[in-house]
Amino acid sequence: MPANHEISALISEHITSGDFPSAVYVVAEQGEMIYWDALSNSVIEPYRLANKFETIYDLASLSKPFVTGFLCARRIELGELTLDSSVSHYVPEFDRTDKQIITIREFLTHTSGLPAWKPLYLLAEDEPERAASAIASLDLEYKPGSKVIYSDLGFITLGLLLERLTGHQLVELAKKEIIEPLKLKNTFFNPELALQTGIAASESGNNYERDMCEQTGLSAYANSRQRIIWGEVHDGNAYFLGGAAGHAGLFSNAADLLVMAKQFLTQYTTALRAETCQLFRENMTNGLEEARSLGWQLAMTKDSTAGPNLPPDSFGHNGFTGTCCWIDAKNDRIFILLTNRTHARKLPFANINAVRRQFHSLAVAELNNSQ
């Protein structure tokens, strides 16, 4: 029986309380799905659609490790990138006095000094080709390497760096090096309109980002979408950059995500070396606010969404839309929870970090009890 009664009951409780309208989860061990389920409705408005295990979700920031981090790891193996190379070597816009020393490693570990977020569609004056320049023009908020401040802007820059380094768009790179080799059928940027009813819906309008702009003193909002965001990327900067960027834009379902997650584990990967897989478990930010590895957060980070029952070197990531994935390499376990917390809910969106921790702790207990 794939659905685990205890886990499904926990998730259903939070659906009933209005934290999110739908969820799909997978708990895998030794590369195989042990528990999985799809709950409630993937779309509430304009009409209801029952959720399915195959439902595709906007992964949001899971795009960072699964696309950008993975592609950077591949370039490092090929000798095209080194972790401690200066970003300005590849992105000349960063050849500035305060930014010359920023490294690839610092972007991958969120220690670059860049702000967490800015509306590029305003800063670049609605010209996507000016994105790198707009980011490079921002003042650093701290000395590179001295703090962990989670930054979309660093990963957007990494996406642009990969495009310039390879001469291929990020969509093409992901298709050629991830989607096609792994035979993924439900993973892509910019879903075709015909697929919309198989995708979990997101926010009605971009009111969250509108509020963010107003809070930062930018009252104009150039990227306002007042329709229901459904089958197109929720993140405003990713939308501005054509639906695919280094920080967001990937759509996938739980089954495909499990296939991708296994690529970060030595015993399953067909694309990376064993020593590269170790980099995902290595704390590269010792003594700082978070424990960060190559593209991932580590479970040893205080208050991480891994919860208290995953080994310290487990690595994972959250997505703003309500997604998360954690990988326990020590015990060969993968935990995936996909929700669409931004759909059919007035602001503020529910903070579901406690739900994520409960999910992981309960899943570990259920796996241990079954042995």
Image: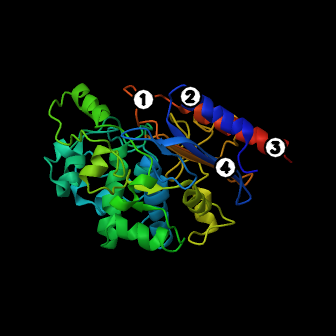
Residue 127 vs residue 38, the one in the foreground: 38
Kindly identify the residue that appears in the image at 39 percent across and 54 percent down.
Answer: 196
> Which is more foreground, mark 1 or mark 4?
4
- In the picture as drawn, the residue positioned furthest to the front comes out as 47
Give the distance between the C-alpha atoms of the residues marked 3 and 2, in whole angstroms: 28 Å
> Which is more foreground, mark 3 or mark 2?
2
Q: Are marks 3 and 4 in contact (CB under 8 Å)?
A: no
Q: Are marks 2 and 4 in contact (CB under 8 Å)?
A: no
Q: Where residue 242 appears, x then y in whole percent?
A: 26, 57
The three-letter amino acid code for the residue at tag 1 is Phe
> Which is more foreground, mark 1 or mark 2?
2
Residue 298 vs residue 26, the one in the foreground: 26
Kindly identify the residue that appears in the image at 43 percent across and 44 percent down.
Answer: 110
Q: Earlier in the sequence, mark 1 or mark 3?
A: 1
Q: Which residue is mark 2?
A: 16
The dot on residue 182 is none
